[in-house]
Amino acid sequence: MRIVKQIADSDRDKVKKMAFKKVVVKLHHIFNESTGDDPGSELEIFGRFDAARLAFNPDIGEVIPLVSSNLFDRSSDHARDIEEGTALIVDTSAEFDIFNGEFLQIAGHLSEQDTFGPDDHLGSVDLRIPFNSISTGLVDLGVFEESGQRVSVKLSATMTAQG
Ligand SMILES: [Ca+2]
Ligand SMILES: [Ca+2]
């Protein structure tokens, strides 16, 4: 009995030493800053955003996603119209427990749908925030832009617990 208890205690110590942060990632909205040279006053926006917990896997020598959650996913056929100066409210979120040495990844891409020619790729992002840099605040994803068609994405991280 005593041996079993000692093992349990040492496991608990190990867990205690392994620092973690509980973080909620929220995609608030996609904002049309400028319709640019696109016909009409709206942009037809589609694309995808995902958040993930990444960890280094020594067996394959690469950083791989352990948990992934989709925040936005629209195909070209289901593009959303966003009037210039207004936002498409998304309000999706995902919660992760990230451990010391791991990364929080925000990855995605946005395009603008056209019927008169090929769609416009507005940009893509692959942000890997190291454990030590994870904090509460807005995550700057830059602007997504092509020939004056410009949208910004409001995305935040909120640390709800750490240990
Ligand atoms: Ca348009
Ligand atoms: Ca268009």
Image (cartoon, rainbow, N blue to C red):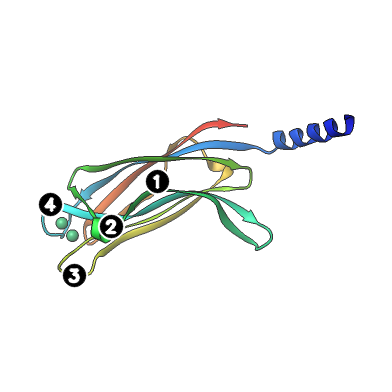
Camera-near label (4 vs 3) is 3
Which quadrant, please, contains the C terminus?
Answer: top right
The residue furthest front is 1
Q: Position of residue 128 (x, y in %)?
A: 51, 51
Indicate if the residue with disc 4 has its beta carbon within 8 Å of ligand 1: yes
From the viewer's perspective, is 101 left or right of 92? Answer: right
Mark 2 lies on residue: 145
The residue furthest right is 2
Vertical relation: 152 (above or below) 137? below
User: Looking at the image, is mark 1 or mark 4 earlier in the sequence?
Assistant: 4
Mark 1 lies on residue: 140
User: Looking at the image, is mark 3 or mark 2 earlier in the sequence?
Assistant: 3
Mark 3 lies on residue: 117
Which quadrant, please, contains the N terminus?
Answer: top right
Amino acid type for the residue under numbered disc 3: Gly
Mark 4 lies on residue: 41
At label 4, counting other C-alpha atoms closer than 10 Å, the crowd grade (few under 14, some 14-19, many 20 or more) is some
Q: Position of residue 125 (x, y in %)?
A: 41, 56
Camera-near label (3 vs 2) is 3
Amino acid type for the residue under numbered disc 1: Asp
Amino acid type for the residue under numbered disc 2: Glu
Q: Position of residue 87 (x, y in %)?
A: 24, 42
User: Looking at the image, is mark 1 or mark 2 earlier in the sequence?
Assistant: 1
Give the residue at x 60% y 48%: 102
Give the residue at x 74% y 37%: 14
Work out whether residue 124 or residue 6 is closer to the camera in this orientation and state it.
6
From the viewer's perspective, is 155 left or right of 4? Answer: left
Indicate if the residue with disc 3 has its beta carbon within 8 Å of ligand 2: no
At label 1, counting other C-alpha atoms closer than 10 Å, the crowd grade (few under 14, some 14-19, many 20 or more) is few
Amino acid type for the residue under numbered disc 4: Ser
Q: Are marks 1 and 4 in contact (CB under 8 Å)?
A: no
Q: Secondary structure at mark 1?
A: loop
